[in-house]
Image: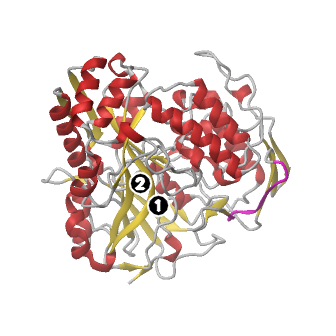
Amino acid sequence: MRVTKGAQIVAGAALLALAVAACGGGASTGSSGAGSGETPVRMEVGEPQHALVPGLTAESEGAEILAAIYDPLVNYNENKQADPNVAESVSTTDNKVWTIKLKQGYTWHDGTKLTAQDYVNAWNWVARKSSAADATGFMAKIDGYADLNPEGEGTMETVKEMKGLKVVDDTTFTVTLASPFSQFGLMLGYTAFYPMHPKSWEADGKLTAAAQEQPIGMGLFKLDKAYKKGTDQTIDLTVYDKFTGTKPKNWTKLQFKLYTSSETAYNDLQGEQLDIHDSIPATQLSSAKSALGERYHDDPDSAVGYIGVPLAYNKDYQNADVRKAISMAIDRKTISEVVFSGSRSPADDFISPVVDGYRQGACGEACTYNPTAAKELYTKAGGPAKIELGYNADGGHKEWIEATANNLRQNLGVEVEAKPFEKFASILESLQNKEYSGLFRMAWSYDYPSPENYLRPIFGKIAIANGSNYGGYDNPEFDKLVDQGDQAATADESVKFYQQADDVLLKDLPYIPVYFYRTNWGHSTKIKNVSLNLLKQVNWAAVEKA
C-alpha cells in the first residue's frame, strides 16, 4: 500500500509522540478532545509526512487518518477483490474505458452533495505536475496524464485536465485509460482516488490553507479542528451524523495521538491511556501475548521490509555485486525468529506471499545467508569501507537494524553506522530531497491487492520524481515488462509479465528484501470488536466501547 513506518507493520505504524516524557518518547494525555465530555477512542499514529491531502499522502500514517475522514470508492473483501462502496458500480468491457457510478446520499461534512465532478477535479489536481503530489503516479494510466506532466526540469503543464476523465452526470463519470489495464478497478480503494471538496482550491488552482489543515471529508468522521503539522499532538474527530454507512454503536469521538516512540505507545496501551496500538515494538513481542491476552493480535500482513539502496545517488552501491554481497551477509532467519520473536519470515521475493505472483525462493542465492561468499564478493566488487544505515527511530526498528549492522560488520569486515532519524516523515523527506545517500530502512504494504503494486510504485521510473522510488532505480526493461503485464488480457497473463519484471529486480537488487511482515497489534480493555481491514486500517464502524 504505501511506504510504512513501523517495524511491526509496513504501511502502518506509530510515529510521533505527544508531549515528551522523561523516557524520551511521547507522553499520553487523558484529554477527551474537542472540548467534549465524552472520552474518545484513542489510537497511536506517527506524524503524517504531509498535510492531510489525499494526493499528497503515500505513507501509512497519513493514510490511516485520511481513511477515517474519507470513504473509498471500493473496499476489499477477504478474497482480495474489490467490492463497491461509495461506488454503486465500477464497470468495463475492455479494461480501457471504465464507468464509475456513485451511490446516492453521500454528502460532504458541510452538507454539500458529493458529485462525480468532485472526483474528476481531485484526480486532475493529483495528476498535474505543478501539484508535486506524491501519489501522482497512480493517475498515470489515465489518458491525458502525459499532457499534464511534460518532460523536462522546470517545465509545467499547459492544460489542467486529463482528456480521459469525463463527467456524465452528477453520479456518473467515465475513465478512459491510455491503454487497457486489468488492475485499474482494484486501485480505486487507494487514498489517491478519494474525492476532494469543491472549495479545496484557490482561483489559481493551488490548495487552500483550510484544505490542507482541516479538509472537509465525506467519510465516517469529520475533523473537530484544524491540524497544524509539527505543532499539534493530537488529531480530534467526531462521527459525521449524516454519514450514510454504518456508524459506531456507542461512541462518537476519535482521537489520533502522535508518538515518536513505539515503546512509549505500548506502555500507554498497557496503562489504558491508549486504546489501539497497531505496531507493537519488537522488544515487546515476546511478552505482549501474555500481557494482553485476547487483546493481542497477530494477523497476516502484505508488507515487505527492505534495506533501501540509493543507486542513483551514491556511486558506492552502483555495482550490483556490492548489493548482492550485502544481501548475502544478512542473517534473515535469525532476525525473523529471534529479533522479531518469530513474527516475521525471511523475505525471498519482492512480491509478498499474500498476493498472486509470489514465488517461494525466487531470490535464490542473493537472499541466502552465506558470510564467506558475501565477503569474497564484496571485496572483489570494491564495496565501501564504511556503510551508513538510516532508519526511523519512531517505528521500533532499532533492534533489527542493529542486528543487520552487526551482520555487515562481522561478515563484510566494514565499519557500519546505524543512523536514527527521529520520525518516519524526516527520513522520507531526506530521501525525497536527495539529502541522504546512505542505505536506509524501508517497507512497503500494498495499496491494492495486486502484484503490480509491489513493482511500479516503488521501482518504476515514473515513481522517481513524485512517488516512492527513493533509490532512483531506472531500468527500461523492468518498466516494459510491467507495462506488458498491465496490458495483458487476463489476470493470469498479467502475473506472468509481473513475475518477469520481478526477475529483473531480483537480478538488480535495487532494494534488499529482508523480511515479510505480520501485523502485531493490540487494544485496551475499554473497547471491543476491534479488527483491521486488508489495508491494515481499523474498521471503526464495528468498534464498540466495552
Q: Look at the image and give the residue range highlighted in magenta.
A: 83-94
Q: Per the image, is 89 magenta?
A: yes
Tell me, yes or no, if residue 165 can be seen here: yes
At 53% from the left and 58% from the top, the residue drawn is 67
Q: Is residue 255 left or right of residue 52?
A: left
Asked whether 401 or 498 is in front, the reply is 498
Badge 2 crowding class, 10 Å Cα cut-off, few under 14, some 14 to 19, many 20 or more, is many
The residue pinned by badge 2 equals: 12
Q: Is residue 6 above or below residue 28?
A: above
Mark count? 2
The answer to whether 369 is drawn above or below residue 345 in the figure is: above
Q: Earlier in the sequence, mark 2 or mark 1?
A: 2
Which residue is located at x 60 percent, y 42 percent? 498
For marks 2 and 1, give the CA distance. 7 Å
Q: How is the image coloured?
A: secondary structure
**Residue 268's disc number:** none
Q: Position of residue 337 (x, y in %)?
A: 25, 57
Q: Secondary structure at mark 1?
A: loop
Residue type at numbered disc 2: Gly
